Image (spheres, helix red, strand yellow):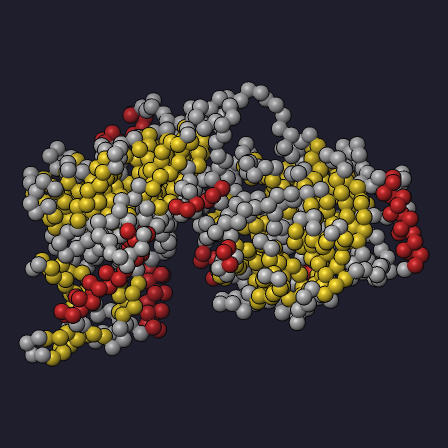
Amino acid sequence: MLFKFYCFYLMFFKIFIILSSSGFVALSESESESCFVHQYFRQAHRKFEQKTNKFWEYDEQSNSWLQVDLPYDLVSCFNDNCTKVNRIDQTYQEPEQREISTKLKDEENPYSYLPLRKRVSLTKLSETSIWITGVSGSIYERFWNGLQWVIAPHDLPISAGYALCVFIVNQTILALSESGYLYQLQLSDDQPVWINITPASDHKTNKETEQSSVVQIVSGVVTSDRKRIYFCTMNGTLLELTEVDPIRWTNHGKPPGANVAAITDASTFISEVVFTISTAGDLYEYDQSSRPSWKKHIRKESSTQDTSLKPSIGCSLKGVNGAISKSLFLLTKGGYLIERRSQQRKWKWINHGNPKDHALSSITCLSEENLAENSNSLFLTTAAGYIFEYRIPDHSGIDQEADNTEIWINHVYPPHAKAAKGIPGVQLQPGRIIFPLHDGRLGELHLSGLGGENSGPNYQINARRKSSQKYVWSLVDAPETEGWNAEYCTEEHGPSNCIAGIKDETNEPDFTTSTARRRRSSKEHQRYISIDKSARKAAEPEGDYNIADNWINKNFHLRVMNEGKSFFLITEGGLIFEYLNSENVWFWLRHDHSTAMKGAIGNYNGSLFLVDEQRSLLIRERESAELAWINCTAMKKGRQVIGGPPWDDLPGKSRNARKEDALFFVSKSGRLLQFTVALRKFKWKDCRYPGNTKIASIADQELLRENVVFVIGRNGRLYQYNKVTELWHEHYQSQHLVLSRSPGTVMRLSSLSLQGSLFMLSADGGLVEYNWNPSNGWNWIEHGTPDPSVILVGSPGPCFAGAHLFLVGSDGKVYLRFLDNGTWKWRGCGFPYMENKVKGNEEHVSDNHDDKESCTSDFVAARLGKIEENLQALNKNCDSKVALTRPIPFSEDTVLFELRDGRLAEMRRTGDTDWTWSRTIGTPNSLCISSFWATLAS
């Protein structure tokens, strides 16, 4: 299609042959809304960036080139039907002048425009069901089960790719993929499956592949009776699905000399007539019963504003100016609201303007019932993410270009969540409208007391009371695929059942909820605080982060390679050793590199990611039978790094590889960097930093919440980056709570539930938990320290079974924080050998709730004690206390600690809550044991 498009322009230029000394650069002219024209516009509609003010036209009569006067209209003619396709203006400026003009324009308009969200759409099935396609390309349904709103997934198969939008026609559900294929939801063995029903192309050459032999669909609109659906295709034709069972297609072609870029109305404005908009911004109507079938609606040109239409869906209303009047409301590319009105067989254009300083990007239509009560209101989304209500004046027979606060009512947007640019909302019922938000969630604009997250369809509406009520916003959560917290419904009987919710009357205690000391809850606070991009202007200057020399090695000293089989150790001198098992024999394997290493900061699909003394990111991996090194920092846009994700997986669990997989790192200058690793298509991306705060460390990457990276700023506050929406949010945090700059640890009970916690240390050495559960949302919980004389150091260790968290104290001892019937308790585990034993080598930690304080059995204690006594007699360099190096989980029931003398010590779980010291491991890094097996990796 791109080739054909440019061929058209080449033929056009053969007639006019306009040349420029600097040429043209193709850029996207405007972005369209919803799923209707995303892909087509990005591929087929181009705007040329003007690089000069001198152009020439070839004159056939004089057989010479003549310089043209600007402005100059570019015209395309087909069978004597000429259409203006573009215009050359006298607007070229030097780069310096352009930069100054851009800054002045930004100062003049205080509202920054949002980027267009691909793949996002809303489709209403009924007042109890709305189908949504998210930014991630997933499909989910928001359904009222009679008790509460629930979320049900309906994703396309992986082979189909990302979803763009959903259509509901003739009681059939269809979905359009980003690659242009149409799928139908069918039942197979009582299971819903998506079946590809994309029509085959009528014209196919031998050179075309099988993929190009089918029609690629770009967008579609369902008729008001929901019996038919019209599509526009990649090559700009109008396609109709007349029947679903059996499937029947009709190709209606395209307007002469133009194309179909978007369908703005399908048989709603006028029965059996389809209105379309071309790439050039012209309005056409298609009536199969008339001759000719295609008619163009001519409009007068305006010198003050761009009146060419924006390819987008419109809104048709009846009775705006009398009972017999019909109106089709459209948007221009300049962001103005324009009306095409038919009254007594006469047509006219009416310009309704726009709110001051705002460009309109989409229209949301309301039902006739709602319109009657709201005096013909339209709801429009601006390019800056605001929602305006436009109350159409009864006397709107003249242009409405002036700003009028009485007819343009600003409903703004939900707190800290702007509306998605260019995506229409849907009316759930009179007085309740759902809008997609820029951050991936939904926002409900409803009359106070009528709607909200916990309110189902309400048919008891008092019209008199409704007229006096005001609109308010409610936030609606999205599922984890979008990086949010809505849980999917279940097949189990209960409130969250996918079909019919049943009230839970068991009243059983929830043992997964902590009873530790909470900070005051969140109801009066927004837990997610959006970050203004303008705040970056006040950010601290770019520069390297002055971290301690041993910070990287302390937090990334150890890394598991294969669970239970091998792990890596990076020595303080920069050497790389791997401890692995071969035929039940454990030995050390050395990996050499020309530069000294600082730490192992990631592991993906058998490849280890390390950072060297020059802060370069390196990959150690096996190629066939050989081991190889790859320098990632040397790649395009590569950066120097100082840290990465603390954990690769939860203990005992592993994640499946996905085509969006990436690792995140912290740069020397405090930026978050995304490094794509899926399918070995390595690629760097700069995710910047939140507001004016540089990043100190990554607290978690996608373990607590899929598609979300939690980071700790250098100011000791918690932020998150959404990989899907590419947005930063700050989490509400008391001003008195300052976090340590060390990485965190995740506790998640089940992959089927979003309930979980992120554990971090505070700056004063206490344990802090950031917990999420469906009942209370996000809450901060302070666990304090195991003893008033002890503070916690380093970073939190691994968390097992969602209930056992290991930490290291300032006294060189290990402490276990575990959950027992809903109550958090401390247990002291000491270190592998303590010369002054308490109660047979059991270390006691004072806690009123403790009933077990032992982490070492008598047998193991006696054996380790004897070994330690012999070692200390032979070598004064032995110190059995635990170092502040971050411990790692070696398997789902073992954890490794580094001792102060460089050795490693292992703890093993022997029961549900019992952990014991099991062995110590001599390392090349320790002076306590000088003999160890080591070999050099080839």
Residue 759 % position (x, y): 64, 45
Name which residue lies at 36% across and 61% down: 107
Give whichever of 600, 335 is nearer the camera: 600
Residue 566 in picture, x, y percent from top left: 69, 53
| Residue in the image at 28% along x and 67% along y | 49
View extreme (right): residue = 873
889 horizontally vs 655: left or right: right
Where 828 sits versus 187, above or below? below
Is the C terminus in the top left, top right, bottom left or bottom right quadrant?
bottom right
**On the rendered structure, is 743 left or right of 29?**
right
Quadrant position of residue 862 = top right
Give coordinates of residue 351: x percent, y percent. 18, 49
Residue 451 appears in the picture as rendered = yes
Residue at horizontal 63 percent and vertical 32 percent from the top? 512
One can see residue 669 in this view: no
Left or right of 234 on screen, residue 577: right
Vertical side of 231 occupied by 922: above or below:
below
Question: Which one is in front, 23 or 116?
Answer: 23
Quadrant of the rendered image containing residue 443? top left
Residue 174 sits in quarter: top left
